[in-house]
Structure formats: structure tokens, C-alpha cells
């Protein structure tokens, strides 16, 4: 079992990075690793790990849904009105019906079995869509109109709808009939008639439990201070989120996945600083969860059953997406302020299949449903085709179809590699400049560029300065460079060349800063630099000036 985990983590990571360097989504490499390591080819993954695959996938989906909730923007959702709500029902319903009709026509299924296939195929993949939308938010694409937020919310609601209909159809087809309930007065309601009530209850209770869980986390982590750092915050929050998913499986009266997403959403409203810390923690958890999710997803794909249904399966998927889902997208955005290009973005941004199909695609076959093997094959085909395509298409078409707006760092984690410029000379003040630069770099896990502009030929002094930088920045990525010419101009030029975030430099003497900097190097840098400048004094005090 440990050997299998090592294979999964190491091969999944490195092959994923190879795929990324080849300009393909990293999940493509991870899925290929799963196929190679799985029982279809290498048979390297142990039965214990494969037996725990569903549980591990559940944990990974919980992580990504919590990330989605922590990235939602209430104001943008309110701005969109009913668009997000319609995206949660119409595209999924239209695709499921289109797939059902295509299955009746092409596969000779009865309509209910075709609709069962439609519920499996119509579900959207949070593992592909959520990271893609959060990345768009971090870059500003579509944020002005809240398009990523609408897609995130809609995909969560659509999965709730389709999973409910799937469970109803499965019970009916496997047992031949499904029981309803009898109301006072002798009125009997069938499961189909009860479906709207089940749907409303699942959504309302899911949102309510998410709100209660968020309040509990704020009380435990922010007010009562049961934890001491962000890692412990994330551990506790992940435990409660996973508890919601497990309870939903044992007590299926609410949507566990929706409850997890609602927890993250309400955390932003109740305690934004706590939400920011958790956002960073769940970003770290996703690094591991993503590898496990997609490698095990690849290992679950049955390659042998794809041959006989490849062409007809592709046709079914095309009909479901290009006819059914497109109609749903049109109806969902009707009357909105979305442009034609923004509506067109829903095709690459809202079509990926992966996690839900991997979780429920094999259930009809296990329940003995006629056509179960074909259903499993098409579910696997939908993963192989749409997951890599969606992961590639979202970042590729967003710049072409969406408008770029201002990024809100309170709603999404912004990944930026920080580079600092430490401008030093051979005076004793260089120690304090390097110490301050090291302190800032440690906080941001950044890099330091140490610049010395040579004004007097002093090889020994330069070498001593190089050794000093090496000693004070021993645990920090850094480089030591020299320049010549006008000191202020060389500092600013180097800062632009290395795309630094801040410039750290020294101020000699004890006179007031305004008096000391007039005509000095520091004053000149302050006047011509567009970047923040941190001026370090002899007493190690620092003043940041833009």
C-alpha cells in the first residue's frame, strides 16, 4: 500500500509537470499515470488503495469544493440575479434529456435508462471547473460581471439536481418500482412528484448546515482560539467539511457537497481574515488531493469497454453538449448583461466531466441495469475527452472571450512569486539592508537580488560584500550582481529587469529623512521609481515610501 502511494504521488506529480511543460493540462499527465499504474496495464496500485479510491476521491472533492466556497463573491452573485440559479438547473437538465434521446436513438435504450445515462454525463466536474474558475478570478478574467462565480455556483447546484434524479431512476430501474408517500386524505405522491420537494429540502438544509458549520468554525478558530496557526485552522475546517459529506451519505436529506461549499462562502462573510488563512491552507491540501484524485480517476477507467462504443459514445457526448447544454446555456443567460463572447465561453468553461462520472458511472452495472456496461464505457469516455479538453480550454479561451477586470484579493488567493532588490554598498549599513531584505523574503517565501553599483574600484570590498550576502541570506534564494554608472538609474533599471516587488536600500546618518534625502541616492530613487522603496536607517528602523 505504501509503495502504491509513493508511485501515485511521485509519478503523478512529475508526469503532470511534464504535461504542463508541454503546454497541456497537468491533469492529463496524472490521468495517464493512473491508466499506466492501474489494473488495465501495469497493475502497480495495490487492491487496498483501489478499494479506498472512492473515499480518497471524496476527500479530494471536499477540498476543491471548500476552495470554491472560499472563493465566491456574494456581490457578484447578487449582481447576476437569477443567472447562477438558472445555470444550476437548465444546462444540466437539457443535456440529460438530449443524451437520453440520443441513447434511445443510437443505443436502443428505453427512455428511463437513457435518462439515467444523461444524469451521469450531464454532471459537471468540480475537480476541473473549480480550479479553472479560481485561476480566472486570480487573473481577473470575467470578474467584472461575476462570470466565474456564476459558473462555480451553477455547477454545484446542477450536481445536486442530477444526483437526486439519478438516485430516483436507479431505484426505479433496479427494483422495478419506487415507493411514494401517502398524504392525509388518501393523496399519494410518486417519487417523481416528490422530486421538487426533495430538491428544495436538499438545497435549503445544505445551505443551512453550511452556515451553522461556518459559525462554529469562526467560534472555535477565531474567537476561542483553539488553534495556534493556519495549518491547525485548515485541519479543523477540513475535518468539519468532511463530516458534512459523510453525514450526507448516511442521512441523505441534504447535499453534503453544497453544504461544504456554503461553509466556505459563509466563512468569508463571517470572518474574512480566517477565510484568507483557510484559503491558503486548502490551496496546499489541493496540491496533494489533485494528484490522488486524477491518478485514481485514471486507474478506474476501463479501457477494454471503450472499443465497441467509441464512435457512438462520442456522438452521444456531442449531441448532449452541442445541442442540449448549449440550449440550456442560452436559456440561462437570456436577459442577462452577458455578451455573445461571454456566453460562448460557457462551452469550454462549463462542460468538463470527471469526478461525478468516476464516482457513479459504474453503479448501474453493479446494480444489474440493462446496458450498464455501455453506460460505464460512455462515462469513462466523457472523462477522457472532456476533462483534459476543459482544463486546457478554460485558460486558453478566457483571454479571447472574457473581459479582464480588477482582482479582489479578499475573495481569491493570488499567487505571486516575490522578488526583492537589496541595493547595498560597502558601508556597515549594508548589514541592516540585507537583514531587512532577508526578513521580508522569509515572510513571503521570496527571492532577493543583491545589487552593488561600483563607483570605486575595490575588488576586496566587493568580495566581502558578496560573502556577507551569502551569510545573511543563506536560507533564501538570492543572487549577487554588480553594476556601474549612475547609481539611482542602475537601481531602477535592475528593479525593472528582474520584476521586483520592492526596493530595499539604506539611509546614512541620523538627520530627519526629508533633510537627509535631498540630493541623495535615496531621494533620486524615490523620485524615479514606480515601485515601493523601503529605506533602512542606521538604527534598523525602516520607512516604506512609494
Image: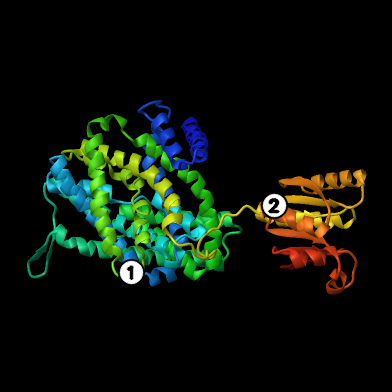
> Which one is in front, 10 or 47?
10
Label 2: element kind: helix
Residue 256 is at least partly visible in this image: no
Mark 2 neighbour density, 10 Å: few (under 14) some (14–19) many (20 or more): few
> Which one is in front, 466 or 485?
485
Residue 180 is at least partly visible in this image: yes
Give the quadrant of the C terminus: bottom right
Residue 497 tag number: 2
Position of residue 31 measured from the top left corner of the image (x, y, whole percent): 41, 37
> Which one is in front, 540 or 249?
540
Q: Residue placed farthest to the front in the image?
A: 485
- Whether the residues at callouts 2 and 1 have beta carbons within 8 Å, the answer is no
Residue under the image location 66 percent in, 51 percent down: 445
Would you place residue 74 above or below residue 126 in this image? below
Q: Earlier in the sequence, mark 2 or mark 1?
A: 1
Q: How is the image coloured?
A: rainbow
228 vs 62, left or right, is right
Quarter location, residue 253: bottom left
**Residue holding disc 1:** 336
Label 1: element kind: loop
Q: Residue placed farthest to the top in the image?
A: 42
Residue under the image location 68 percent in, 58 percent down: 501
Position of residue 467 measured from the top left corner of the image (x, y, whole percent): 84, 44
244 vs 284, left or right, is left
Position of residue 523 measured from the top left corner of the image (x, y, whole percent): 81, 67
Would you place residue 339 above or below residue 319 in this image? below
Residue under the image location 58 percent in, 59 percent down: 227
Position of residue 276 measured from the top left corner of the image (x, y, whole percent): 54, 62
Q: For the residues marked 2 and 1, what is the alpha-carbon distance in whole angstroms?
A: 44 Å
Amino acid at each position: 500500500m505504501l509503495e502504491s502511494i509513493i508511485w501515485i504521488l511521485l509519478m503523478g506529480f512529475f508526469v503532470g509537470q511534464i504535461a504542463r511543460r508541454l503546454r497541456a493540462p497537468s491533469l492529463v499527465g496524472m490521468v495517464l499515470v493512473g491508466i499506466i499504474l492501474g489494473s488495465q496495464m501495469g497493475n502497480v496500485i495495490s487492491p487496498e488503495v483501489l478499494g479506498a479510491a472512492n473515499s480518497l476521491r471524496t476527500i479530494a472533492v471536499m477540498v476543491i469544493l471548500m476552495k470554491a466556497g472560499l472563493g465566491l463573491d456574494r456581490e457578484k452573485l447578487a449582481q447576476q440575479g437569477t443567472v447562477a440559479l438558472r445555470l444550476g438547473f437548465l444546462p444540466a437538465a437539457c443535456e440529460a434529456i438530449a443524451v437520453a434521446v440520443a441513447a434511445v436513438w443510437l443505443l436502443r435504450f428505453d427512455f428511463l435508462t437513457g435518462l439515467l445515462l444523461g444524469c451521469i454525463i450531464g454532471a459537471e466536474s468540480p475537480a476541473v471547473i473549480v480550479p479553472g474558475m479560481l485561476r480566472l478570478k486570480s487573473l481577473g478574467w470575467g470578474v467584472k460581471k461575476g462570470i466565474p462565480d456564476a459558473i462555480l455556483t451553477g455547477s454545484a447546484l446542477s450536481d445536486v439536481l442530477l444526483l437526486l434524479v439519478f438516485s430516483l431512476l436507479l431505484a426505479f430501474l433496479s427494483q422495478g418500482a419506487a415507493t411514494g408517500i401517502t398524504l392525509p386524505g388518501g393523496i399519494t405522491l410518486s417519487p417523481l412528484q416528490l422530486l421538487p420537494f426533495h430538491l428544495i429540502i436538499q438545497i435549503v438544509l445544505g445551505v443551512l448546515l453550511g452556515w451553522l458549520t461556518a459559525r462554529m468554525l469562526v467560534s472555535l478558530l477565531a474567537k476561542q482560539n483553539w488553534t495556534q496557526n493556519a495549518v491547525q485552522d485548515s485541519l479543523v475546517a477540513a475535518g468539519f467539511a468532511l463530516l458534512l459529506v459523510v453525514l450526507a451519505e448516511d442521512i441523505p436529506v441534504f447535499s453534503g457537497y453544497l453544504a461544504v461549499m456554503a461553509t466556505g462562502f459563509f466563512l468569508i462573510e463571517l470572518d474574512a481574515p480566517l477565510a484568507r488563512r483557510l484559503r491558503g491552507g486548502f490551496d496546499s491540501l489541493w496540491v496533494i488531493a489533485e494528484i490522488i484524485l486524477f491518478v485514481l480517476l485514471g486507474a478506474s477507467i476501463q479501457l477494454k469497454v471503450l472499443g465497441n462504443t467509441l464512435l457512438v459514445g462520442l456522438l452521444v457526448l456531442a449531441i448532449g453538449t452541442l445541442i442540449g447544454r448549449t440550449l440550456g446555456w442560452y436559456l440561462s443567460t437570456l436577459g442577462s448583461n452577458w455578451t455573445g463572447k461571454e456566453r460562448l465561453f460557457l462551452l469550454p468553461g462549463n462542460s468538463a466531466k470527471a469526478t461525478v462520472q468516476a464516482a457513479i458511472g459504474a453503479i448501474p452495472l453493479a446494480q444489474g441495469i440493462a446496458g450498464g456496461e455501455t453506460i460505464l464505457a460512455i462515462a469513462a469516455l466523457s472523462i477522457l475527452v472532456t476533462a483534459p479538453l476543459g482544463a486546457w480550454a478554460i485558460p486558453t479561451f478566457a483571454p479571447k472571450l472574457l473581459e479582464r477586470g480588477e482582482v479582489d484579493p479578499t475573495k481569491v488567493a493570488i499567487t505571486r512569486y516575490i522578488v526583492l532588490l537589496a541595493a547595498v554598498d560597502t558601508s556597515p549599513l549594508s548589514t541592516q539592508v540585507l537583514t531587512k531584505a532577508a526578513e521580508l523574503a522569509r515572510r513571503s517565501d521570496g527571492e532577493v537580488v543583491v545589487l552593488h553599483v561600483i563607483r570605486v574600484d575595490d575588488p576586496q570590498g566587493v568580495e566581502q560584500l558578496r560573502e556577507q550576502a551569502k551569510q545573511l541570506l543563506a536560507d533564501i534564494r538570492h543572487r549577487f550582481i554588480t553594476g556601474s554608472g549612475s547609481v539611482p538609474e542602475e537601481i531602477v533599471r535592475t528593479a525593472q529587469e528582474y520584476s521586483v516587488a520592492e526596493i530595499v536600500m539604506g539611509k546614512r546618518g541620523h538627520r530627519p529623512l526629508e533633510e537627509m534625502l535631498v540630493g541623495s541616492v535615496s531621494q533620486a530613487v524615490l523620485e524615479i521609481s514606480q515601485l515601493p522603496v523601503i529605506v533602512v536607517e542606521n538604527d534598523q528602523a525602516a520607512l516604506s515610501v512609494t
